[in-house]
Image (spheres, rainbow, N blue to C red):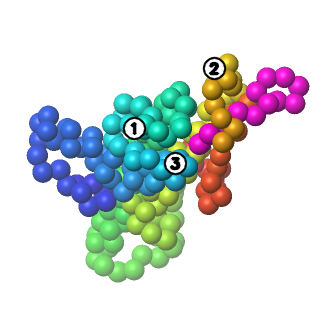
Amino acid sequence: PCPCGWQLSTGGEEGAQRMQQHTFWDCPVAQAVMQQVRNAIPAAPEVSRKHLWLLQAPPDSGLYQPVWAVVCLAALNAMQQGRAYMWALHKRRQELLASYRASGGRQVSLEECWQRAAGTRLSMVPPGGSPTSKASARAAALFWSHLQDFADIGIVPVDWVQRMSPSHAFMRIQPKPRSGHCLVLHLPVDIVLPEDLY
């Protein structure tokens, strides 16, 4: 079962398809990323799985197709990384629970925790939410971080300059002071990119 609570009920090709749909669409981690995508599109068209998976911009969205392809790849990657983070948090919780049970249910002292973690990272999950909610927030931030990484490359294809409107969703073209152009991300005000995402 997925740490979010979803459980695969069938195997074979059908099971693989359901797993793919859950991982890259239905899981709360994937939906957190898709909420970022939807919020960034001013026209707010219906964004379907087909639009994401096939990198096809929704009709009447005003999105430039090459930019949409970058957005989709950033979203899919953020979903995958967010789920990996959720599984890592889930595994740490399971290890802590097993450790607690092995100790006979007694409270473990900080000194014992530090001794167990010697030579490794502290294995405790920080307070403040479930692995799913933490992974969802991280995946949303990763999505924007991936787009920022793309913009930071500093290469803007000529046809982008000619075809992207100044109010394009996700990113816009901006002239450089001396010559050429750069991409500038339209980062929502409620998203802060932490430095330790990777």
- Mark positioned earlier in the residue sequence (1 or 2): 1
Give coordinates of residue 117: x percent, y percent: 48, 59
**In this rendering, would 162 be left or right of 66?**
right
Mark 1 or 2: the one toward you = 2
Residue at 49 percent across and 40 percent down: it is: 61
| Quarter placement of the C terminus | top right
Neighbour class for label 3 at 10 Å: few (<14), some, many (≥20)?
few
Name the residue nearer the viewer: 30 or 109: 30
**In this rendering, would 153 be left or right of 115?**
right
**What mark, if any, has residue 102 been given in the picture?**
none
**What mark, if any, has residue 52 been given in the picture?**
1
Camera sees residue 139: no
Check contact, mark 2 vs mark 3: CB within 8 A: no
At label 2, the amino acid type is: Asp
The Cα atoms of the two marked residues, 2 and 3, are separated by 23 Å
Check contact, mark 1 vs mark 2: CB within 8 A: no
At label 3, the amino acid type is: Ala
Q: Is residue 157 above or below residue 52?
A: above
At label 1, the amino acid type is: Leu
For disc 2, the marked residue is: 159
Q: Secondary structure at mark 1?
A: helix
Q: Is residue 94 above or below residue 171?
A: below
Q: Magenta part of the protein: which range?
A: 168-181
Mark 2 or 3: the one toward you = 3
